[in-house]
Each structure stands twice: as structure tokens, then as C-alpha cells.
Amino acid sequence: MNNENTGDFRRTIRRRPLPYETQPVELAGDPEQSASPDLNKTLDVGETNFQPVAVPPTVLNLVKEPDQFGYLTTGALIFSKVVSTAIFDTPAQVLLLTGSTTASLLLWLLGGLIAWAGVNVYLEYGIQFPYNGGELYYINYVWTRPPLLLTYTYSTMFMLLCVNRGSILSTAAAICRACTREGTEWDDRVQKLVAVVVIGTTCLLQGYSRPIFIHLNNLFAMHKLLLLVFLSFCLFAVRAGGGKELDAQTAAENIRPDLGETTSSAYAWGWSMLLIQRSFLGYENANLIIEEVRRPVGDPNKVFRRAAKGAIILIIVLYMFVNTALYTALTKEEITNEMATPNKDIFALFFKKVFGSSTRARMASGTVIAITGMGNVMAFTFAVVRGTPQYILLPPTSFANLANYANQLFRAPRTVKQEIARIGAVPLPYPEFWAKTNYHGAPGPTLFLHFIISTLWIIFTPLDKANGFLVWSTLFTYARSYLAIFLAVPLLLAPRLSAFNNPVSNATWRPRAWSFMPLGPALWYTNILTIFWLIANGFVLVIYWIRSDPGKSLGEPDAAVLPSWLAPVVATSFYLLGAVYWVWDLKILPKLGYRLSIREERRGVVDYVYFHREITGLAAIFTNNLSAVLVKIKSGLSKMLTW
């Protein structure tokens, strides 16, 4: 078997069909043979070189209609993931970094515009490639040279870095505040233990019941919406002089224009933008589970499109109100002094200024933040880990049907981490184990893997450093800035790329997130938003390599801090790790004698399809010799023990 065929097979077999390439579920061929296939057969595809065939488009409805997500659930998944504990911590951190309330509010408005531009980009990709997995397939479609390089680099980064450590640790801190008296300090190890319990409980609940998980997520989203609306009304009460410990004149003085006090540190501006982008992160959540979103007849993207736009507009408006309310009620000195305390709680101080001093302000603040954090952790885990039950995939009756079969391999909807584990794009031992689905229809092993990686990040987060939590909690946000470049550049070139155009009908791509616009204005609007999103993420990527003093930026020049270059180095290293594994897996191993095969296993009405390597050539010689040596060693040890 030549290596060229192996590479072609691997590239094609891992690629989901485009909408105009999808096949019916039933395969062509002899019905009797298809009805009783040999399910224990291993298919050797080394002699076959094929490409997917183009057929008229079909609408995928792989999830039963009662289980599909409507406007409420789709919007709630986005709302719950975006609105996290960051909205309670980040405003004070941004104010410390910039030194100006006016500059902070302008940055929050800029962050909202960046999020709006990002939503537009993800809407276009979600409509063009309506498959669970989101970015995993977007980059696989548009970056085809070198084959699978970006798929491997993205998979490594996503699997190892896509952990909601910031929200988990903030939720744990809120629980500790709610359960302790004012003035109580807790050990960092206690906070980390509570954080491990939070992520463990979330994974167990998701692995047990999908409907319960969805209903809880909707309730948490409703809680967050009511909480942000309540905090927004507090702004009007404060400006009217309705605060218990705050009059209208003091409130007006707190929010006065103060651009003259803004910092000149480029690092502080870049760090502030990264923190704000982290607070808006999550608008792509619906893309990761888009196959489960309801697709109405006539306009199949209506629910996905309207839910995403509506959720992000609501979040931007409420975020601006909440930030303004906080900066109006508290002076910069009060915020600075509170942030200097070991167990900082800005919103407990906010509640005291608005409603008066109370011993229960700390408990109330901790409770509402903990509930908000749990909703965020649940929405995050649901989209990046969960997979849906797989439908029957009939195996081919001959190699003539192998191209059809390759298209169908990817018709069972999965989410990102389960699909990454299944295709073997990261160096995980026993990949078939991590890709399995438990009897509740949830990816139990992948949830366990997510729990392990989350726990490790929680344990090694340096909470004893002044900026340790900030650096570790924004690693994934920084890494995603690279992804923005990988997605924005192809979208700007979409009319010229084959991945965006339909060769069957010779239809040229046009923006569909704004389908009511004529082609010309829609292209201009989409390109402007895409370029803006690209520049904003590029600024964050570049600014972090500039040497700075994080302690001075945080107002703690004498505190122990992590170096400013640590975040970009660590985030970039995960991409490089994926590139190294790509060289090993697709370039070196085939030359050593490894080749791919497909193994199928049916349990009940579900087919599980796994990728396996067969060992030939030098690899077989080495393995056989190593096995013989191990057998001799084992025999010798047995004789010694017997003697």
C-alpha cells in the first residue's frame, strides 16, 4: 500500500461532506446485503482512492424534532455561556488597568462591537457549514493545504486549553464567600477543592440526563437575565439619589469624564481588551451544537440566526448598564481598596452602597455570583463536550460504495471534544475509548477527560500571584485570537474559495447572515465587520509580546507576578505541539509502516465507527521483536520467582 493513497484516504475520511455532497441515509446496493452486514468486518481501504460525489442538497435532521432547540434554548445556551462571573470581576480589573471610568466604558463598548462582528463571522460559517463541531470543521474545509495541519493544531489547543477554569474558580470563590462570615479568609486549596467539585458535578449531571441539563441551563439563563436587568435598574435608582449610602451628587461625580487620568501603558490596554473579550466569549456556542437547532421549512437558518443576534444584542446592552451602575455607585478609591483585599468582592460593596450595610450583603453577592457561574460552566461544558446519540450507519457492501460510506461516517452529530478524540487529532491513548457514548446518549469518557484536564488546570493555577488568575483564565481567550485570523481571512476571500461555492449549481457564495440585504451592501457590511474583528484580535496577539510590568499595571508594584510574556508563550506552544504531532502522525508514522483501517461495532441500534492503525514493514518487525523480548523477560522473571 503506498503512502499517497493512505494520505488521501485519511484526508477524505476525516472530512464531513458539504451540504451539496450529503447522501441519503440508506446506501445504494443490494437491500438484502445491506440489511444483514458483517459488522465485525475490518475494511482495508489502502487500495482505494476516492473523492465524495456531488448530489442535490438535503436537509439534515439528525435529532428528533421534539428534542430540537428553539429560540429560547438556543438563545439561553449563548446567553448562559457569555454571561459568566467575569461580569462581576472584570469591570473592576479593567478600571485598575486603565485608571479611568470613561476609558473603561469606551473599552466595554468596543468589546461589544467586537463581539457583534464575531457573531457575524460565526453566523456565516454556521450557515455555510451546519454541522456540530464548529471551528473544527470550518478550518478543515477552508485550510486544505497542508492537509489537516490546522485541524491538528486547533484540536490540540482546544482539547488541552478549552477549559473554563476562570469561571470555575470564580464560582468556587463565590461559594466560599456565601458560606463564610465577613472578614473570613480561606486557603487557596479550599477554593480549588470547591472548584473541582463544581466541574465534577457538572460533568456527572450532563452525563446522566440531557433533558434535565437543558432545563437547568434555561433556568440559569433566566436567572442571569433577571439579575442583569435588576442591576441595570439599580443604575437609575442611584442616579436619582435612591442609594442608601449614596446621594445623586456623589453618583454624578463618580461617573464624570476622566480621560485625562487614563494610563499610557500599551500592555494595560491590551490586557483590558483581552479581559473584556473573555467576558463576551461564548457567542459561538450555538455553532458547536447547530445540528440540534430547529430548522424551519423555508428558512432553515432562521432560529439559529435570530437567536444568536438577539442574545448578543441583549448582552451588550445589559453589560453597558451594569458597568455604568458599578462605576456610578463606587469611587475609584473604593474599588482599588476592595481589589487589594484577599477575598475581593466588588458587588458586595455595591449592594451595601445601594441598599445599605448588612451582614447579608456578602452572602447575597456570593449566592447570585455562584448561581451565575454554575450556569456558565454548564453551558460551556454542554457545547464543547456533549455528543448526541448516533443514528444507524449502514456499512458498505463493496468498495464501490466506500465513497458514499465516507460521507455517512460524519452524519452522526458529535460535538468538538468527542469528535477530536474520535479522529485521533491529539495524542490520546486508546482513542476509541474516549470517543464512546454511554447508555444515556452522552459522551461519558470525553466528559471524564474534560474533568481531568479541568482539574489539572485548577490545581496548577497560581492564585498566590497577583496576576496568576488573570493569566491562566485568559489563556484560551488569547489562543482563540489566532483562530480569529484563521477564520476571518478565508471569509474575506469566500467568493474565490471553492469551499464556500457550490460546484453543483455553479452558485457563487453570498453573505446569508443578512439575507434581506442586496448582495453589494451585504458583502460590504460583512467584510467591514470581518476586518474589524481581525484587527481587534490581531492587536491582542501583538500587544502581549511587548515587555511590561504587570504588577504596576495592577496597582501592586511590589507583589509577586507572572511575567507578561507567559500567556502568549504558553498559548502559542499548544499550537506548535499540535503541529509537531501532525508531522509525527501523518508524515513519520506512515513511513514506518503504520496504516489506517476502519472497525465497526453495533450495539443495539447504534453503530460505532473507529479508526485503527495496522502495523506493517519496519513497525511490524520492531513490534514483533519487542514482543519477543518482553516474553523472554517475563519468562525469566517467572523462573526467578519460582526458584
Image (tube, rainbow, N blue to C red):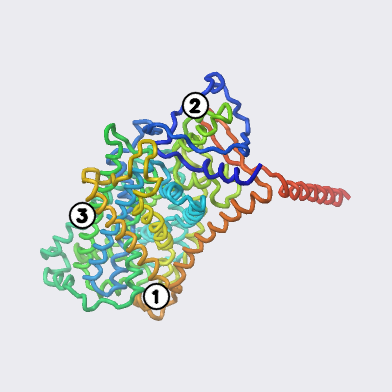
Residue under circle 1? Answer: 550
Q: Distance between the residues labelled 1 and 2?
A: 60 Å
Crowding near the residue tagged with mark 3, few <14, some 14–19, many ≥20 C-alpha atoms within 10 Å: few
Q: In the shown orientation, is residue 93 left or right of residue 611?
A: left
Marks 2 and 3, Cα distance to the nearest angstrom? 56 Å
Please report whichever mark, 2 or 3, sits nearer to the chain's N-terminal start.
Answer: 2
- Of all residues shown, which one is farthest toward the bottom? 558
Q: Which of marks 1 and 2 is nearer the N terminus?
A: 2
Per the rendering, the mark at residue 230 is: 3
Which mark is first along the chain, 3 or 1? 3
Q: Which amino acid does label 1 sit on?
A: Pro
Q: Is residue 202 visible?
A: no
SS for dot 1: helix
Element type where label 3 sits in the image: helix
Q: Which of 512 and 203 is in front in this view?
A: 512
Is 257 on the left or on the right of 626, as rendered? left
Q: In which quarter of the image is residue 70?
A: top left
